[in-house]
Amino acid sequence: MRRRRKELGMTQSELAEGIISVPYLSLIENEKAHPRPDILQPLAGRLRSTMKNLMGVTDEGTIRKAENLIDRIRTALVYDGVDQALEDLTELKSLSSAIADSKVLMKIELLEINVWIHRFDEERYRNQLETFGKRWDNFEEEPNLMIWYLRLKGNIAFLKDRYEEAMLHYKAAEKILPDVTDELEKAYIFGNLGKVHLLMSNPALGILYGEKAIEIMLRKDRWVEMCSMLNILGSCHTHNGDYMEAVHCFERVLRMGNQFSISKVLISRTYHELGICYMKLQEYERATHFLHLSLEVVSPEQLPQWEVGCVHQVLCQTYIKTGEIAKAKEHILKAMDSLKHRERLRAECLIYLGQIHYAKGEDEHFIRCYMEAIESFLKMETSEKVARASHTLGKYFQSKGETDQSLIYLLLAVEHYNSLFPPVDFEVTLPEQKTTVKPFPQ
């Protein structure tokens, strides 16, 4: 009743006038009073609703159909199947008028917000997230909905490369996991925590969370989502230097792709990750083979532009290592064009473009690229990348005998390398002495 009244922009006084008192209406809305049919009927008429809806009664078949559509949309979004998700969402929203269960209605709204996040429609998802909080002022009391809400907030920060902020939301969600019964949401949170730990240079923790997510997916027979989690786990192993473990994860995804109907987008990502892994193993021919496959297995419009850019970025890295500088430059320019709206990834491209300039003896352009990249990394507070880029630039200036410039960047590298490790438990400053210390015997 409260939700419907707010949808129509009515005050309690406007709804209650001539039917019941405002205090009694307040008791009804807070589920502390149960009105008789002769009171409920005129309230329903004024709210342009039905007695069944106001009483929270929904046909079981409608609920089952809605839950099935919710599940389909969630699965579609794992593979960036946004068009399919939108089609199912239209059908789901048409059902909502026949649904009185507030928890199901909240799920539908959160799902719609998630779709707009995947479409990068910031104006829509921000407005709907704000409206959701105002309309459903009691959603925080329901752990299964609160965890979903926090995950969406984390996803928004993640898409903007604000990993520390994303981590705060995901960790807040992790705290309420003991009260959550939705196992799929638990797996999504573990998977997201795995990704953020990976990108914040803590692949060991990423592996632990990835394995937790996979364990749930296996138990729930969610084979398709499990493939996505295997890609996260494999990426963590690659970053941790466990390349054969990583290859095992990616090959497992490809084997499952032959047995189940798995989206080409996910297969493309798996080829991409295999390419990175083989580049790290210095098997450059196999690396370029899989990287090119990742672009060929899907049509251009199926992959988001930033993902296409990431593949070109890794191809550039590979060609730099094989000394094919012209090919490396061709791919890094394509990458930068695709990544112009993703600052962190574009800053990484500046590093590789700088390496290309250095290889060609264009030192001035090399320095400019690295300085611009470091400025971006500092702004985004990505310590590992600041440290590595500053270290390289510091060593370069040292080799040129430019000691002052060298010290600036090497000290910056030291500062940010230091932030990657936890502080030691004990204090550096000694406590004040209480007694006179006796000298050691001679």
Image (spheres, rainbow, N blue to C red):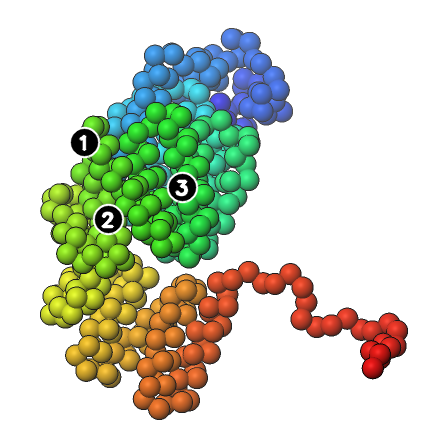
Visible in this render: residue 311?
no
Q: Is residue 228 visible?
A: yes
Q: Amino acid at mark 3?
A: Gly
Residue visible at 15% across and 56% down in the picture: 285
Look at the image and tell me in which quarter the C terminus lies: bottom right
Q: Residues within 10 Å of mark 1 (few under 14, many from 20)?
A: few
Residue shown at the point (14%, 52%) measured from the top left: 289
Q: How many angstroms separate mark 2 from mark 1 (CA)?
A: 17 Å
Q: Nearer the viewer, residue 248 or 391?
A: 248
Question: Which residue position is annotated with label 3?
Answer: 210
Using the image as rendered, state which of residue 68 and residue 401 is in the foreground: 401
User: Which residue appears at 18% of the width and 58% of the height?
Assistant: 284
Which mark's residue is nearer the viewer, 3 or 2?
2
Q: Which residue in the protein does label 1 denote?
A: 258
Amino acid carrying mark 1 in the image? Asn
Q: Earlier in the sequence, mark 3 or mark 2?
A: 3
Q: Residues within 10 Å of mark 3 (few under 14, many from 20)?
A: many
In this figure, which residue is indicated by the disc labeled 2?
274
Q: Position of residue 275 (x, y in %)?
A: 21, 52
| Residue 182: assigned label | none
Q: Residue at x 45, y 76 (%)?
A: 412
Residue 65: image quadrant is: top left
Contact check, label 1 and label 3, Cβ < 8 Å: no
Q: Secondary structure at mark 2?
A: helix
**Could you say where residue 250 lies in the image, as x and y percent from the top left?**
27, 42
